[in-house]
Amino acid sequence: NNLTYSPVQENLRWKCDRETADRICNFNRHYAEYSGYFLKTPFTKDAKKMGEGEQITFYDSNTGKPLFIAPVGRSMSDFLAESKAHGWPSFRDDEVVWENVRCLSNGEAVSVDVTHLGHN
């Protein structure tokens, strides 16, 4: 059953697969795409082109609301290195748009619109 109120948007950033995003974000509470999936997209290439101090806003794949803005308090290269080490984009508390994100008691991160975002 669908856990969210809206479907995944048609044209996802960085050529992310819509079917994978829909399965992970809307029909699941425990799993994610495979570790390192983001490295197979144009994301890291695009991020490395950014100027010093520039940030990337990450949006809810269903609603388009901003969820994370990174990097904050670290360089883009540090953000990318930490994300690569974790296997997924890795956000710190200062990078979370808390008006749109919640962390549940079981460690699951969700948007306020119930889009599954991952686990802490």
Image: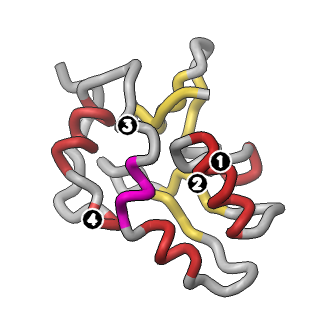
The residue where tag 2 is placed is: 68
Viewer-closest of 33 and 11: 33
The amino acid sitting under disc 2 is Phe
Mark 1 residue type: Phe
Q: Give the overall secondary structure of the magenta segment.
A: helix
Give the mark nearest the N terminus, 2 or 4: 4
The image quarter containing residue 29 is: top left
Q: Is residue 39 left or right of residue 4?
A: right
Instruction: Identify the residue at image location x=38%, y=32%.
Output: 32
Whole-angstrom CA distance, mark 3 to mark 4, is 16 Å
Q: Are marks 3 and 2 in contact (CB under 8 Å)?
A: no
Q: Is residue 26 magenta?
A: no
Identify the residue at horizontal 30%, vertical 23% (top origin): 28
Q: Which residue is mark 1?
A: 91
Mark 3 or 2: in front is 3
First-in-chain label (3 vs 2): 3
Q: Nearer the viewer, mark 2 or mark 4?
A: 4
**Residue 75 image offset from top left, x and y in percent:** 76, 68
Secondary structure of the residue carrying numbered label 2: strand
Residue for badge 3: 34
Instruction: Assign a secondary structure to mark 4.
Output: helix
**First in residue order: circle 1 vs circle 2:** 2
Q: Residues within 10 Å of mark 3 (few under 14, many from 20)?
A: few
Q: Amino acid at mark 3?
A: Tyr
> Residue visible at 62% across and 14% down?
105
Residue drawn 45% across and 39% down? 35
In magenta, the rendered stretch is 37-41
Q: Earlier in the sequence, mark 3 or mark 1?
A: 3
User: Label 4: how many residues lie within 10 Å, few (<14), some (14-19) or many (20+)?
Assistant: few
| Direction from residue 33 to residue 89 in the image, left or right | right
Cα–Cα gap, marks 1 and 2 = 7 Å
